[in-house]
Image: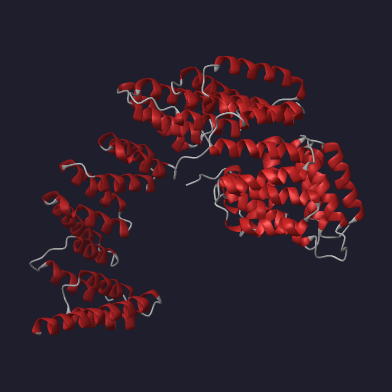
Amino acid sequence: MRFLVTLLFFFIVSVGFSQSSALANNYFDQGEYEKAKAIYQKIYDKNPRDVRNIKQLVATYQELQEYQAAEKILLKELKGNVIYPNLWIDLGYNYQLQNKSDKAEENYQEAIATVKKTTAYAYAVGRSFQQYNLLDEAIITYETALKDKSNANFSVELARIYGEKGKLDKMFESYLKLIEEEPKYLYAIKRNLAEFVNEDKDNEANQILRKTLLLKNQQKPDVMYNALLSWLFTQQKEYQKAFVQERAIYVRSPQKNMRPMFELANLAEEENQLDAAREIFDYLIENEEILSRKVEAQAALLQLEIDHSTPKEYKNIDEKFQRVFTEFAQATPTEIFPIQLQYVKFLAFQQDDKTSALAKLEALLNSRINRYEEAQTKLVKADILVLQEQFNQALIYYSQIQKLLQNSVIAQEATFKIAKTSFYKGDFDWAKTQLKVLKTATSKLIANDALQLHLLINDNMQGIDSTHTALKQFAKADLLAYQNKEVEALAILDKILAENKGLSVEDDALFRKSKILLEQKNFEAAIESLNAILSITPPSIYAARTYFLLAKTYEEELNDPENAKNNYEKIIFEHEDSIYYNEARKKYRQLRGDAIH
């Protein structure tokens, strides 16, 4: 019982101290130093060994310029049996505030001397120096400790300080030395390097890191250096150079992992560096030993050709498909399935041969495929039926997918396509019902597309037109665009714009028109249409997306960085709650020439 009473007493005292300290800290943060001092002093009188409280009391004395009081407490603590070496730094800083630089330096050296004797003090001493921005002294502290033995924490802190002081060569050397000793830190160090490295290959940090890595790899070849060089070149969007490094890693590594090269090829394609993407995919096809991954690479290369081709090139692409089918003639149905499905889509959407496409889909459905492959096949079949405007049959297949793989991403995609098909049919209420289900979709892309379509339908069902004529016309134009009938789609959109000036459908039509024009590479007309959205009063819900599309078009298609920068700036200052804000801010700073840390 006595033990419980004692324990309860100490608990109450502890809570009391904690509450008092919190109140004092609040006064300190508010600049009410006299009130803070009174509480810190009471805590000190009751518990003179509380180092955190001592440091706060000293800091309060310093804010009040009561340097003698601060010195008295610190000297008393430094004469005690238990030494806290970081208090030497507090004492030195107390002298520094009084312009007593010699005495300040003397105490700083005392703190460093304790580290020379016992490296266990290094982190506390180093952090205290950093707290007072005494970076040179912090460097000496960590360097002293590292002479005794390696320590990841000390190395990281030392590298960070070098970075703060602009000593980039020493910072990189410190990080690289740490990775050499502890390869497991490679990914963590990349995050730290990303604070200094950016897309600009002429950026000082980029150049120093590249030279350092190349030199080290010449002196002592190691795949770690290749990995970092690949990472650096990827940041700089020099994908062919990154590929050279990834190829070296693949050749020299016992574990043959080609996945990084696959990701690199996808990045190259996204950045429209098609020659680099083709080169990497070709290498993957030639060297990948796992058949399913070889097929994956082949499918990716064929899709690249499809996405960046004109109708004149379709015959050549068809011949490539036939050569691939011959090459993989011995593959199992599952192994070759991705390319078979890809060829069906090519026939239906590019070659406009829907009859052959549907026949091949029927053959696939009657072959030995698993449930996921069945769902994918039915999804493509339903898409082609929508293309043929056989909406009811398409809805049957989409519904079958929902039941076949409930709650999966492909089932959610099918639900969205049910909504989209209902939209094409003019059944707007049922479309809205389906879209509501997708608000919490696992795929953010599907959830976002669902939200946009729901807003479009809802906004344009609120007007006085109970027959929703304009919305039906818009749905027809959207279907024509899906059918690759851009000329007819644009004609309907222009009709909507002529007949619905000032109504809610106007910005929807303008935005859809802009997207079609951009796909057609008709940039001048697309920019005119996008600017028309921005002139609408009150501001359109498409405003942020419009500024972003304009910026991307000026930057990537028209090589006009000034206009790109102006549109990114609009997002930053007028649409800070937009999903495009972070990307716009990053792009704006790059175009302005800032170092992105």
Q: Position of residue 382 (x, y in %)?
A: 70, 40
Name of the residue lying farthest toward the left: 81
Q: Position of residue 169 (x, y in %)?
A: 36, 36
Q: Is residue 243 left or right of residue 373?
A: left
| Above or below, comparing residue 182 to residue 285 in the picture | below
| Residue 559 visible somewhere in the drawing | no
Number of dots carrying numbers: 0
Pick the front one: 242 or 506: 506
Q: Is residue 467 left or right of residue 585?
A: right
Q: Is residue 475 left or right of residue 221?
A: right
Q: Quadrant of residue 58?
A: bottom left
| Above or below, comparing residue 560 to residue 94 in the picture | above
Q: Quadrant of residue 393?
A: top right
Q: Which residue lies at the image location 78% right of the left edge and 48% below the top edge?
A: 424
Q: Quadrant of residue 170?
A: top left
| Above or below, comparing residue 539 to residue 424 in the picture | below
Q: Position of residue 89 (x, y in %)?
A: 23, 61
| Residue 239 visible somewhere in the drawing | yes
Q: Position of residue 542 (x, y in %)?
A: 73, 54
The N terminus, quarter of image? bottom left
Name of the residue lying farthest toward the front: 366
Pick the front one: 249 or 500: 500
Colour logic: secondary structure
Pick the front one: 393 or 272: 393
